[in-house]
Image (cartoon, helix red, strand yellow):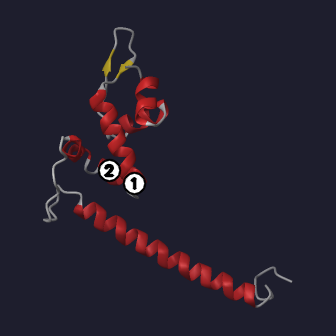
Amino acid sequence: MRIGDAAAAAGTTPRALRFYEQRGLLPPPVRSPAGQREYGPGEVARVRVIRELLAAGLTVDDLASRAHRLEALLEDPPRRCSGAAGPETFAPVITARLAALDTEIARLTALRERLARHASAGGADVPGGA
């Protein structure tokens, strides 16, 4: 199927498929004699997995570091993840993403508290406030 049909089947856009290909998340597709990208059910399934992982909070860079492991998630039934956190597993990536999220949550919480203090003071101590 062509890129537009594959993107629609995966619930995304042709631009996203080209981006995933550029970033190494999706292998370069077979090309038709006219040079158009051709995708099959396997590529559509891989894009769905990529989108699920991105929706779960991982980043494109996180996935790119383990792109070769995405195939394991496409098996039927999917291969179970082991509890061992080796360099080839997603465990270090997930641990790092959780730490980054915790840091961002702490930063945003402190920012919210600071803003709430300013609001309760009537904005008088906000730089440029009345």
- Which type of secondary structure does the marked residue at label 2 adopt? helix
Q: Looking at the image, which residue sits at the far front?
A: 77
Rendered view: 17 above or below 82 = above
Q: Looking at the image, which residue sits at the far bottom?
A: 121
Question: Depth check: 76 or 106 in front?
Answer: 76
- Residue 59 marker: 1
Q: Residues within 10 Å of mark 1 (few under 14, many from 20)?
A: some
- As measured in the structure, the alpha-carbon distance from the residue carrying label 1 to the one carrying label 2 is 6 Å
Q: Residue at x 36, y 40 (%)?
A: 48
Quarter of the image with the C terminus in it: bottom right
Q: Residue at x 34, y 8 (%)?
A: 33
In the image, taking residue 80 as reference, residue 119 lies left or right, namely: right
The amino acid at mark 2 is Leu
Q: Quadrant of residue 120?
A: bottom right
Q: Residues within 10 Å of mark 2 (few under 14, many from 20)?
A: many
The amino acid at mark 1 is Thr
Look at mark 2 in the image and give the residue it sits on. Answer: 63
Residue 95 appears at what percent x and percent y? 29, 68
